[in-house]
Image: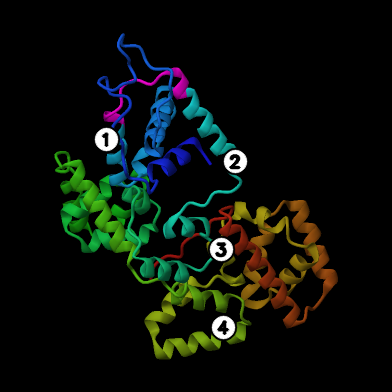
Amino acid sequence: MTALDIANTDIMSTDMGMSPSPFDSSDGYHGAAGQLSAVPPVLSRKQKAAIIVRLLLAEGAALSLQDLPDALQTELIRQMSSMRYIDRATLKSVIDEFVVEIENIGLAFPGGIEGALSILDGAISPATAARMRKMAGVRLTSDPWATIAGLDPDLLLGVLEQESTEIAAVLLSKLKVSVAAELLGKLPGPRARKVAYAVSLTGAIDPEVVEKIGRALAEQLDAQPAKAFEAGPVERVGAILNFSPAATRDEVLDGLDADDSTFATAVRKAIFTFANIPARIDPRDVPKITKDIDQSVLITALAAATGKLESVADFILGSMSKRMSEQIREEMDNLGTVKAAEGEAAMAAIVAQIRELEAAGEVLLIAEDED
């Protein structure tokens, strides 16, 4: 736990009662000659917290006091405004107590539902987290724009499309330039021009208004129901068909064509199979893809690539060094005819390797041309 955490804990103490400040020039701690008394005053935890915050700021520490609720920030200001001078004995006493509290802490919890959910992020399901927030009525107390900046850009795109031009302009202005440019490029031309022009008019907006807009948007986005599936239906069906036998895949797609041709077309674009390699893989990435594939698996897949798939084998071999290509062709000749099931399993292993590299950002699939 940091020094600020302890200070925050003190500030947020339930002891809200305050005795008259022992630091005012009119109190009895200055004495007749104006000297500070050697008798340490009795301080509340809030006064001690104010002393620690003042000391840390004097030492150049960067404190994120804006993360505290407004009421607590106000209380801290009130405490500090009522205090004047502190003698060295009192300061040393407060620091010693502060250090002892830090040293005695073995484990710290953040406090509150939102803090607990932050710690458990990734360990519990998004649906459970959303349900807990709704049950507890959690309201955002930190910077709402930091929360918004961490959301999926596609979620923000909906806000840019549906909110007023002025709200969209404020949102765009508060995002990273790269994210804002990406979102602006996805808006229809007329809408993009209106929002871009509205950005030029945001210079005179009051900071409090921007804060209120951010809080309203953050609460609106947070209130959206949790999705049962991370990926959309097109991506899920495409992922399933990626690893299905070719006969099953063709049969399902034919059925989808009859039931919903638009959905079928989208699924076809989402599918990446062995046959798609020449069209969607950069030849320079082939060595990166094949280096971690077992040689026997690669040879089996290429040997099984006959008929319509022969061009895939030629593409892969043509993207290798001449010596490696000749060696694999020789092994393919020695292997002879490959059973259909073995060939398909080997091809699926190559596709899985490509998908893994794509997820890691090491390989970029070339987008297929729109019809």
How much space separates mark 2 and mark 3, taking CA atoms?
28 Å
Q: Position of residue 111 (x, y in %)?
A: 46, 54
Give the colour scheme shown: rainbow
Contact flag, marks 2 and 1 (Cβ < 8 Å): no
Which quadrant of the view contains residue 350? bottom right
Looking at the rendered image, the disc whose residue lies closer to the viewer, 1 or 4, is 1
Q: Is residue 323 magenta?
A: no
Task: Name the quadrant of the C terminus.
Answer: bottom left
Which residue was labeled with disc 3? Answer: 123
204 relative to 82 in the view: left or right: left
Contact flag, marks 2 and 4 (Cβ < 8 Å): no
Looking at the rendered image, the disc whose residue lies closer to the viewer, 2 or 3, is 2
Residues 30 and 153: in front is: 30
Residues 225 and 303: in front is: 225
How much space separates mark 4 and mark 3, taking CA atoms?
34 Å
Q: What are the residue bounds of the magenta stretch?
A: 80-91
How much space separates mark 1 and mark 3, taking CA atoms?
40 Å
Which residue was labeled with disc 4? Answer: 249
212 relative to 328 in the view: left or right: left
Q: Amino acid at mark 2?
A: Asn
